[in-house]
Image (tube, coloured by chain):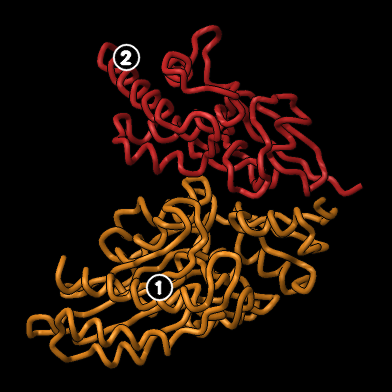
Amino acid sequence: MVNDFRLVRPKTLPEALGLLDEFGQEIEPVAGGTDLLVKLEDGRIRPSQVMDLSALNELKQIRLVGEDLHLGALVTHTAVLESPLTRTEAPLLVMGCRTVGSTQIRNMGTLGGNLATASPAGDSIPALVALEAKVVLASKKGERTLPVEDFLVGPGKTERRREELIKEIILPCAREGEKGFYNKLGQRNALAISIANVAVWVRLGERKNTLSRVRIAFGALAPTVKRGRMVEDALTDRELDEASLKGITQLAWKEVAPITDIRASAQYRRDMAIALLYQSLYHILFLS
Amino acid sequence: MNLVEVEFTLNGERQKVIVPPRTTLLEVIREHLGLTGTKKGCGKGECGACTVLLDGEAVLACLTLISQAEGHAVTTIEGLAKGEQLDPLQEAFIEEGAIQCGYCTPGMILSAKALLRKNPSPTQEEIKTAIAGNLCRCTGYVKIIKAVQKAGRRSAEVAAHD
């Protein structure tokens, strides 16, 4: 049974930030509600106030600003899939958002909500980390910007302070010569929480079968989404073939720190981290 | 008493409800406004039985706080037929035998409705993606997919004649 919270419904971002400044300790903001409502329903959280953000249309915009794409915190996964801007400028994020939940969940759930919930298995997050996206946190006192990777502290834990709201996410637009791949393993193809996933972003090298920049983010394989810097370094600026790719991707098991839970064992997750990474890079190098 | 006032349209009619803020859209539709076509299944966003349309998009009424419906247009299964005239999707579901126990049907039809609005002639894969969030434990989905394809074709024919 949901507890009897008080509801606040700000109409503008300044109004929302004013409320958080005053009552932040007691307020639970709700964006799409797909995680929060479940937690409210089973009593895992019992806030005294809930802030319904749904009227804040200013946080639903996708904008091109110089070389960057700015995505408001309330942009839904469906909006990411359907926007012509994200399709051309952030195809890796589109791939990640496509695997979130179901159509209904994608229609409701937001990028900001996915980040704030900070599930290690959140499907949009590995793409954001691989793209070196930044998150803008706003409070009454001003704004601060930090890399998504640093924003995530642990399962359900982030750097967001109680008086802050995620305002937007900023990521660099895709350029010529860059490629991305998002690879998810769930118990079935739809509506499944990731057992393991990986997002790979690369800049192709000048020589054939080389990569001049590589960024890898593993999901559901550690307490937070995690960069695979050892593998990234090993893949950079060297000629890759099937055999060397197979060898290098084995390093992935050293990068991840998975747990055993109802969905899979830690050992299986480690094996899948390697397999998903190998598949992704194989696709980027030899199939696309 | 701690209450919240919310105005929205339900199947084209303006509604104003005054309810505790914790009330979900599903509870308002079923308990306060008496339209029981929308079903409660899992209550966690996994089964899709409570699917309704919010401004034409499929959403889960069990995970929507009533305040989130403020100013929006909500459509439930009761809002599809025009008088005695069933929606092409409803007709196709009956003709194809796409209904068995019927519990998933309202949500399934509304997910299909949202799909056909954007994409009148979807492929089988596109239909599967659109209804992936609606569980049916009776039909095996084959007849549901056929019904959605049929309704899409029929709507296209009707549109061509108009």
Residue A174 position, x and y percent, is 26, 71
Between B19 and A198, which is closer to the camera in this rendering? A198
Q: Give the residue displayed 56% in from the left and 76% down from the top.
A: A137
Is residue B138 shown above or below A30?
above
Q: Chain of mark 1?
A: A
Q: Chain of mark 2?
A: B
Between A31 and A200, which is closer to the camera in this rendering? A200
Q: Colour of chain A?
A: orange
SS of the residue at dot 2? helix
Between B20 and A9, which is closer to the camera in this rendering? B20
Q: Give the residue displayed 46% in from the left and 60% down from the top.
A: A186
For this view, does B25 lie left or right of residue A197?
A: right
* Residue at far left of view: A207
Is residue B132 shown above or below A260?
above
- Which one is closest to the eye, mark 2 or mark 1? 1
Q: Colour of chain B?
A: red
Is residue A107 shown above or below A246?
above
- Which residue is denoted by mark 2 in the rendering? B158
The quarter of the picture where the C terminus of chain A appears is bottom left
- Which residue is denoted by mark 1 in the rendering? A272
Residue A225 position, x and y percent, is 49, 78
Tell me if residue A58 can be seen: no
Tell me if residue A73 can be seen: yes
Residue B12 position, x and y percent, is 58, 24
Residue A45 position, x and y percent, is 77, 64
